[in-house]
Image: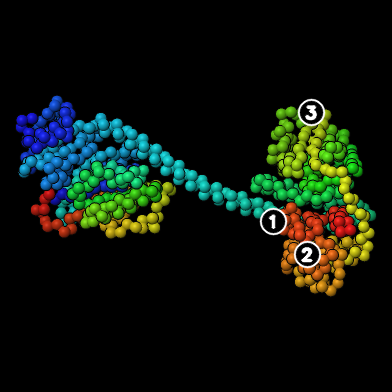
Amino acid sequence: MTSLPMETAEYLQTEVLMDTRCLVVLLDADGRVTGLECPWGEWPLAALRIGSALPEPLRAVLDASPPDQAVQLYPFIYLDDSQVVDVHVCANGANRQLILRDVSEVHQAELKFQQKAHEVSLLLEKQAQLNRQLELQKVELERASKAKSRFIASMSHEFRTPITSIMGHADLLSRTASDANPPAAIQRASWHLLTLVENLLEEARQGQGTVHLNPAHVDLDAVLKDMAALFGEQARSKGLELRIGASPSDASLETDELRLRQVLINLLGNAVRYTREGQVELNTVFSDDRLEFRVSDTGPGISESDRERIFKPFMRLDETGQSGAGLGLSITRHLVDAMGGQIELDSEPGRGSTFRFTLAATPPGKTPIPHDLEGLRVLLVEDDPDALAILELFLADWGVEVHSASGLSEAQTLAGSQGFDLVISDLNLDEGSGGEVLQAVRALQPECRTMLCSGSGVSSVWREHYGGFADDFLMKPVQPDTLRAAIERVLSDAA
Amino acid sequence: MISRKICVLGAFAVGKTSLTRRFVHGVFDERYLTTLGVKIDTKTVKLDTATVKLVIWDIEGADPADHEVQLVNSRMKAYLQGTDGILLVADGTRPSTVDVARDIHQWLLAEYPDVPVTLLVNKSDLADLWQVDHHALDGFDGLLQKFTTSALSGENVELIFFSLAEALTKNDEPPDGDR
């Protein structure tokens, strides 16, 4: 201690305290070690020897230190990978001293903490980056999913137009042909095709999490008759008995008829497809404001363990030689749920299965008055010539006086020159829209009844947009029975 | 022989120690070992005009978490005293480190306006993860140079030290300018 310059000794006392691992390095003007003092203990530092040059890190610190500063502290200087020192550079005239304190332990502890903190920061940064990437991918996937749904929706729309034409012409054929088989086959194929399209469309909609319904009064008799016609031939060809019970006369059902048909076609289609002998039945029972539909078969039945599985998409119990995409029951359950019902299954393996679902129904209200449509003046607005021809034929068959227009201006001209009882317009026209047509006709003829018709879109949405000036809505493909029922309903409401 | 002090600065884990080790010892280690304090290394380089001993101060990384408090802390300030040149390092796979470098650069412009600064965007070997484009390097006025580097492959590593050494000795009078 006695050999230390006064300032250095004072600095040691006041700042460095009594640290046992503290070394004072005395230097000459060239920075060579002239003395080593360990004031409060023993700390042999191998890198330092009297008469030697300073190790590089210490030499660098000494060189960098401003010569005019009395004491300068350089904390955490690595001497090597394991030894870290705080370096105090003390000026003492021409000579300088270094006071070294071994801070390796403190440094190591802080370093461990720092290392962990940095590793956590890096992980968090990485996570944030991944989250951003995921977010971008999510947006991209959503965009792709929407594009897919749009594609399927537009494809479905494209399908509907020719199907409408096929079904209309099949209907005409069935009235004129002596051999009823070809038109029946066309009709069957059309319904089959339509149901497949609707199933696909529904699958796409499920991806969006929504089912849009077009609720309207359902002519249950007509639906059941169609089911009998649709599956009669198929059942007969397999030697099965198809029994379709009469509809209850005391129930009035308002739901989405197309969806109801889809559900019944899916259930009856499965029953006929999987039943080898015996019978397939469809019965309806009205009780407590609920209408129960029951589809029973004498097929192989479904085991307890398979009862949930069959309602999953793309799932079929028997993969051998059966047609269909495996979407039917999944979509059936989804649709029944959306219509406010619940599908249930009773089955006994080897004995058969019964699928049951109920929908809300009411006792019959005002029954549409059967109208004689003879001489009814109808303005028909449709830009697709095939669809127009079919509707014209249906209407002409009932003695309706039909005037046709292909767009808004033609419709306006006709409505300006003669009176109409009813205007039926397609929603999407090449020139103008169905909404504009109905508005224009209503403006000229406030008493005229109005109906909108479309192959795409959703009638509940139309009701919001066009409810003010459309009395009813028709979904394509329009069947003669549906058209007639809708016309009679509209005319009854007016009466 | 003349000697020049170079400080290596930047956010943590951008590769300051790896670049220095690559240059001084010709080695690279994949592990990330944080630096707390300063590691001082030297390397003598022969330029066309002079032989220079580079004293490289590899300074602990700035932590953006401390950004609001003190990006350049008191330890770093002590280490920077008397520096002749600065290598400012960012990580091309972490855009936040470019922001840290930009803030340090602003501080340097105020505190060390005459000291040349070279900007390095490191880890060019990680092309798939690269996120720093040309526009991200806007706002670095008055830099000596900008380089992309890779301590792993060694891309541009020699070049940056040599060109900084040249810049730091350009106006030197030979060779009694020992420090």
Element under label 1? helix
Q: Quadrant of residue A494?
A: bottom right
Element under label 3? loop
Which three-letter amino acid code belongs to the residue tagged 3? Pro
| First along the sequence among labels 3 and 1 | 1
Q: Report the disc number at residue A438.
A: 2
Q: Which residue is mark 3?
A: A349
2 and 3 marks on the same chain: yes
Q: Chain of mark 1?
A: A
Along the line of sight, the residue nearer the viewer: A433 or B150? A433
B84 on left or right of B18: left
* Residue at left offset 31%, top offset 38%: B34
Local crowd size for mark 3, using a 10 Å CA cut-off: few (<14), some (14–19), many (≥20)? few
Residue A88 in the image: x percent, y percent? 16, 38
Check if mark 1's residue and mark 2's residue have beta carbons within 8 Å. no
Residue A343 in the image: x percent, y percent? 76, 37
Along the line of sight, the residue nearer the viewer: B31 or A474? A474
Q: Chain of mark 3?
A: A
Local crowd size for mark 1, using a 10 Å CA cut-off: few (<14), some (14–19), many (≥20)? some
Which three-letter amino acid code belongs to the residue tagged 2? Leu
- Report the Cα–Cα distance between label 1 and label 2: 25 Å
Q: Quadrant of the N terminus of chain A?
A: top left
Q: How many marks?
A: 3
Residue B68 visible in rendering: yes
- Report the Cα–Cα distance between label 2 and label 3: 56 Å
Q: Chain of mark 2?
A: A
Residue A406 visible in rendering: no
Which three-letter amino acid code belongs to the residue tagged 1? Ser
Residue A399 in the image: x percent, y percent? 92, 63
Q: Is residue B157 above or below residue A421?
A: above
Q: Report the disc number at residue A154.
A: 1
